[in-house]
Image (cartoon, rainbow, N blue to C red):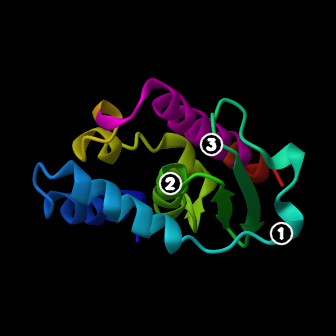
Amino acid sequence: MSIEEVEKEIIEEFELFGDDWEGKYEHLIELGKSLPQINPEFKTENRLIKGCQSKVWLHSEKQGAEIVYTADSDAIITKGMVALMVRVLSHQKAEDILKANLDFINKIGLTEHLSPTRANGLVSMIQQMKLDAMALSTT
């Protein structure tokens, strides 16, 4: 699936909840629970995303032509947010990750319903994932 196709799928999932933000948060928490487990050896200080209020670990590696991400967080909402980003960007080519505009975040209303610190954390996650994709694209 392309990044745009995954984004469309996520938008459709969140539309099922209408204006029910409690339901949307519960869905986000469930997504966090389904996040593929990061190998414990990658939960190191140098893999913490700077700018996140909670602890968020991100591991990125190149598998063939694709970048694969695994992540974890010590906070349930943040874990759901990083699960969304992993779902959208993992198993994609670096050049597609770098040019992705990630419109789905605004379309599902996430940015307007996050605290400023969580919104900053989301921006930091995206920046780190794109930086990693850029670094891995040269290997």
Vertical placement of residue 68 versus 47, above or below: below
Q: Does the magenta stretch include residue 128?
A: yes
**Callout 1 amino acid:** Pro
What are the residue bounds of the magenta stretch? 113-132
Q: Find residue 69 and report its horizontal and vertical position in percent.
A: 66, 62
**Label 3 SS:** helix
Image quadrant where residue 86 sits: bottom right
Relative image position of residue 36 (x, y in whole percent): 61, 74
In the rendered image, the quadrant that contains the C terminus is: bottom right
Near mark 3 (Cα within 10 A), the count class, few <14, some 14-19 or many ≥20, is many
**Residue corresponding to mark 3:** 130
Residue that numbered label 2 is attached to: 85
Residue behind mark 1: 40
Q: Which residue is drawn at 64% across and 41% down?
A: 54
**Could you tell me the amino acid type at mark 3?**
Lys
The magenta stretch spans residue 122: yes
Nearest the viewer among 95 and 51 is 51
Left or right placement of residue 70 versus residue 26 in this view: right
